[in-house]
Image (cartoon, helix red, strand yellow):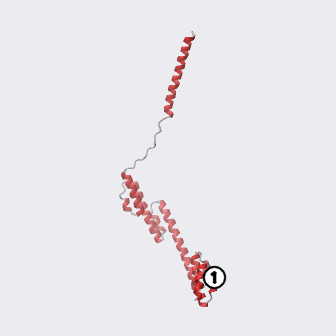
Amino acid sequence: MDKKCYYNEYMKTKFLIIGALVLIAIALSGCFWQEEKEPAIPEMNSDAALDNKLFSDAVKQKNSDLCLKIKNKDPKEECVNSVQGLLSIDEAIKKTDAALCKKIKLERYKTTCETLVNEKSEKEKEEKQQSGKVQKALDAQDASLCDAIKDNEAKYTCKYNILVNKAEQNKDASMCDGIGFPEYIEKCKTGADE
C-alpha cells in the first residue's frame, strides 16, 4: 500500500473519529446546558389582592364583617378567627379572666392571651399589695413601713406623706431627711419651714 493511500485512510478515520466526538459533545451539551427556566411567579389576581386588603383591614379594625367579604374560604376563616382572637384577648385582659382565652381557636392568639392576662393579674396583685403596705404605713404614721414598698416612687411618696405632716407638726425640717429622695426632701422642708 502506498503512502498516499495510507495517509488518505488515516485522514478518513481521523475525520470520522473527530466527527463522532463532535456529535457526542453536542449531544451531551444538551443534557448539561439546558436552558434555565425562571421560577414561576404565582399570579395574583384582583380577587386575591382584594382578599389580602380585606384581611389586613379586618384585623387592624378588629371587624369580622370585613372578613366575610373575602372570597377564598381559607383566608376568610383565618381572618374571622384572627379578629375573634383579638377581640377575645381584649375582653380577657379587660376582665382579667384567662378562662376567656380558651374560646380562641388560633393557638398563637390563645397563648398570647393567656400570657397577657397573667401579666396583668400579677401586676394588679402587686399593686394591691403595694397599696396595702402604703395604707398600713399611713395608718400607723410610721415611715419605716414604707421601706417594704418595691416601687421607689410609691415608697418616697409614702414617706413624704408621713414625714411632711410630722415635720410640720413638730416644726422640725430635719425630719424630712428620712424621705430619701432629694426633690421630696426639699419640698417637705419648704412645707415644714412655713
Instruction: Check disc 1 and report the residue beneath it.
Output: 178
Residue 10 rendering spot, x and y as whole percentages: 55, 16
* Left or right: 50 as drawn, with respect to 160: left
Quarter of the image where one finds residue 63: bottom left
| Frontmost residue, 53 versus 64 | 53
Q: Is residue 193 above or below residue 30?
A: below
Identify the image quadrant of the N terminus: top right
Local secondary structure at mark 1: helix
Q: Is residue 49 above or below residue 104?
A: above
Residue 73 rendering spot, x and y as whole percentages: 38, 54
What residue do we see at 50% from left, 33% from top?
A: 31
| Furthest-bottom residue in this view | 170
Q: Residues within 10 Å of mark 1 (few under 14, many from 20)?
A: some
What residue do we see at 59% from left, 76% from top?
A: 152
Q: Is residue 16 above or below residue 177?
A: above
* Left or right: 66 as drawn, with respect to 21: left
Q: Which amino acid does the dot numbered 1 rest on?
A: Gly
